Amino acid sequence: MRKRLFGVIVSVFFLISLFSLIHPQSVLAGDSVEKKVNIENFNADKDTIIQNEIVVKYKNNQSNSKIFSYFGISRNTESKIEKIKVDNKDQLEQRINELQNDPNVESIQPNYKYEKFDIDNTSANNTVHAMTSITGVNDNQWYLERLQIPELWSQSTGKGIKIAVLDTGIDSNHEDLVGKVVGGQDFTGTGSYLDNNGHGTFVAGIIAADRANNIGISGIAYDSKLLSVKVLNKDGYGDTTTISKGIKWAADNGAKILNLSLGTSKDDAILKEAVNYAVSKGCIIIASSGNYGLQGITYPAAYDNVIAVGAINESTQWCYFSNFGQELDLVAPGSKIYSTVPQSINALKYMTYSGTSASTAIVSGEVSLLLSKQPQLTVKDILSKIKETSIGIGFYTDEALLYGNGILDLKKIFTGEYSNYSFNRIESRDNNTIDNAERVYNSTAFPYVELNPHSDVDWYRLDIPEDTVAKITITTPQKNIYANIFSDNFYYPDRILKVDGKSEYYISNYYSNRNFYLELYTPNLEPSNCSLNIQYLSINDPSIPKDQTLKYSIDSISQGKVITGNTLDISGWALSKLGITKVEAIVDNQGFELQYGLSRPDVYNAFKDYNDKESGFSSSLNISDIPYGTHSLKLMFTDSRGVISFSNAITFTTIDTLKYSLDTTKSEMTVSGNSLLIAGWALSNASIAKIEAIIDNDNPVALKYGLSRPDVYNAFKGYNNKNAGFSSYINIAKYGYGSHTLQVRLTYVGGRIEILQQIQFNISGTLKSNLDTLKSNDIITGKYINIAGWAISKAGIIKVEAVIYDKAYTLSYGSNRPDVYNAFKDYNNSKAGFSGTIDASKLPIGNYPLYIRITEVGGRVTIDNGRSFRVQNALYCLDTPKAKQLVYGNKLQVSGWALSDSGVAKVEMLVNDTAKTLNYGISRSDVYNAFPKFNNKNAGFSADIDISKLPYGTIKLKLRITDKLGRVWTQEQVNELEVEIKDTAIFGIDTPKDTQSVTGNTLNISGWALSKSGITKLEVLIDDIPYPLTYGISRPDVYNAYKSYNNQSAGFKGTVDISKLDYGYHHLKIRATNRDGRVSVSQIHGFGMDSTLQYNLETPTYFEKITNGSLNIRGWVLSKFGITKVEALIGDQCYEVQYNVSRPDIYNIYKDYKNLNSGFNESLDVSNIPKGSHLLLLRFTDGRGIVNSGPLISVDIQ
């Protein structure tokens, strides 16, 4: 069967060049001389290796070695890896043959090609942006806020971490990278590690750009340092030698993190050795998954000891270009990432790119923050944290291939609290991901589908019913629109269409309802569009074309054939002038894909006009899961249009020829001892692979099959099998006494399984035992647990153990127990006792199960029913405070008692997780009398805890007891105690009244406030903005009403400037701060700001016709705040209108406004405004700068 990949094909050429992801091959550096080279590697995909180059790893520097004649003085004595160039293929083979015979050569391989992983920029900017003063983050760095990185800078900034960027170099003179690069090395031959491409500088900025300069951007780990390791040339390409040498150099020069935003599709043995070397030196390697959009992570990211990073977009969806697969560890933002670029190359300082390169840099920055805080972590530790703390993405099981473990949650690692990561997926209507594909349930037309260059992929999910054909028609005025069609398993595309003008394709579904996926995209540099028409047709619709050129033959199975085995061999050939893409066998509506494309020179010679030398098909189908009986077979041929043709039906029959007998085992039999004999015979015309016995669903035990059974041969000579017997002794010592299940199972070659026997049987024995000392639910507060009891068996006892969870403690067996001897004299065992002690100080406080495990002579192990006990360092009681208790004042009284066999060292109360030590050793005769075995008359504890600094509301209390063995127990293991600190503050607001309307520029506030803790500061909050109030004014009325507060000066007053408040509703609260620093807030009062604006537009009137291009505006406007500007807005024009025109008539009507010049008047030139109906809006700006909209009318410009 042809293998497939799950993938998105960026173009047909990428498909061709990357198909080698299916079968990665390499020569391991440690292979023997006979396996120094696989010549097929040099004939592999031409786009993944550098032609006519060989990479050689040699063992030592022997001068007589043939290898050194090829590269002379350029020998690399440290890495012992060199590159040899040849002129042509013949010379390549000659060199390989010579090197294979050189004993100094360890391995030979192609020089694999590596490339950077980015997508063309979507925007650019040369402006130096200031960062926000609060977070130090540029607005374009959307991913920082999304990942909540600024919140973590208080925990770590990457200080002390050195990150090697293995890339195209770094522009260390960039304004945002000055002082960041502390060293580097060039492996491309330019002699400088400065960037001559831009990619490396882009990656470096994401990781470590300067935050303190307050320009440009901020790196995630802005206090980390960088090494510029130049391994890619000016075009963004490198090879095996540059990358592997760069990795080793970085590891040897102090890099903790290696960022590789690059990769190849080939498993490279030399590279893998370099990766292992760096990891052995404590380096963390983080690499890109790849930008091909295919299943299969590129190398080095695919290695187990490298962190593989994929990309998501702003909607937390898989980026179409991001490679995916089981090796993917996590994802990070990789779409529209804004970062630094060399101005000398791009004439710009900052640009926006997409790609897994950017995602990798983001993760490198995050890991730098983590290592700065926890430098001891290894790559294994970090991979574990990724699995444990990452935020999962995806709603379906298969999406783990796209997203790995999800998004790294640094906040969870640092603080233990999960990030409130913002998912935008639900809000997105974008259909550029598989999981957000447009659903198509029936015939649907999409008249206009727009595809943007490089970044836009449209997905459609076709839900096709049974016996339905979906006809897909794509029409476009442009060239180079591609369509990939996937079956419901998302493997390699079933069909890749290049649409030039108009293309049609058919998806035929002859099974039950299935889903298919259609993907549209374009590699064009300009936007493209097409129309998409999807028609659902019956399979019998006459409009579906037929393949009139189909010829086929089925060679290997004939009509009416009887199959006695579990495989069905099918072979033959098929030809079509339209091309055949797939051949399937349909057996009773179950589909099997056949291997197609086999050489058939006989068919080629017979039908030369078809020009197809590989028309053969052949497969051996496993039919072990279909029932015995008559079956129908048809072949289904799919041509290049998706049209399906069927062969004539062939019927065949499968029959069961099995005969068998079980000779030694019967239902409900009883066995004793440690072995069980299972014997019998089995015959079948199908090949028997094995016979097994299974007891209690345990692992199967193979029975010896093929034993001579002449009696069976003579009875069933038609089977011609003299060796049909099976027999084996099964060790049943590990199974306890009582009832058990036995199943005897036969498996045919091909996998079909038959159950020969399933019975219940009993294992009997003579074991008796008892545990005397530890009872169920006992509490252990001392250092040791004493275990004692007895056990007897007529088979003899080898060992007695106490088991707590999975840990066994061997007990001493054989002590005198005359009581047991007298009770069970037939056992004749006077030394049946067992005893031992378990160190309870090694057990954390909590509940435990304990079992007694007894091993008898012969190996049978019996475990009793067990019992539970609790390890606790103390018995205790908390007398005060009680749960939900209200506390007034600044002291919390705590009292109680604690007892322990080990002695109590310390008692503490955790108040909101802050420890307060209590006084222990207070006389408690009541406790002594209740628990005399502890012999402790001074078990009491008490304290008055200062809570004056705590805010009002609920506080959490937990009692913590430490015994003299150092064991610590905290009350949270059972439950927490909560008490409430009660607020005693009360308020009265006299002015303004609730819901009062207010005019003018000031608001007078008065009232009173009381608190039993005393008030040091009083404020009024207007719309949550504080203003100070004067407090301490005599209020005898309040004193008389609340005498318990003993405050005769509880009054307050103040005046607040409200001239800048908008008209409408506002809220007001009084905030008091008491002597302890606690804050209390009153209930909300509301008040309204009334507008003083009065106006009238006298001309023009509604629907007035405007001629001669002149519009006369006249009217008046008043405000008690004054009017500074009048504007008229019409069309897309804004005109300022003359104000302060004398209007004595208005003055006489509104004398309280004291304004004689409230008029406005202006003749506006509207000749440049198109003719027709337009809206005219007046806008007034008052003396506070607040803009108010005036009248809105319609006028007709003619």
Image (cartoon, rainbow, N blue to C red):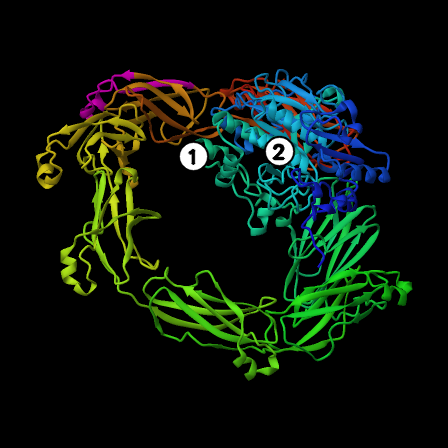
377 relative position to 848: left or right: right
Per the rendered image, the range of residues in magenta is: 1032-1056
Residue at position x 13%, y 57% in the image: 819
Residue type for callout 1: Gly
Q: CA distance from mark 2 to mark 1?
A: 32 Å
Residue 1104 is one of the magenta-drawn residues: no
**Residue in front for this viewpoint, 601 or 780:** 601
Which comes sooner in the sequence, label 2 or label 1? 2
Query: How busy is the neighbourhood of tag 1: few (under 14 within 10 Å), some, or many (20 plus)?
Result: few
Which corner quadrant holds the C terminus? top right
Question: In the image, residue 124 lies at what x, y percent?
Answer: 71, 27
- Label placed on residue 275: 2
Q: Please tell me whether residue 240 is drawn above or below residue 9 in the rendered image.
A: above
- Callouts 2 and 1 close, C-beta under 8 Å: no
When asked about the image quadrant of residue 46, the answer is: top right
Question: In the image, residue 708 lies at what x, y percent?
Answer: 54, 74
Residue at position x 74%, y 77% in the image: 558
88 relative position to 110: left or right: right
Q: Which residue is mark 1?
A: 416
**Residue in front for this viewpoint, 918 or 792:** 792
Q: Is residue 812 visible?
A: yes
Q: Please tell me whether residue 965 is drawn above or below residue 428 in the rendered image.
A: above
Residue type for callout 2: Val
Residue 1044 is one of the magenta-drawn residues: yes
Question: In the image, residue 742 lies at what x, y percent?
Answer: 42, 69
Instruction: Provide the secondary structure element on which disc 1 rests.
Output: loop
Please tell me whether mark 2 or mark 1 is closer to you in this view.
Answer: 2
Instruction: Provide the secondary structure element on which disc 2 rests.
Output: helix
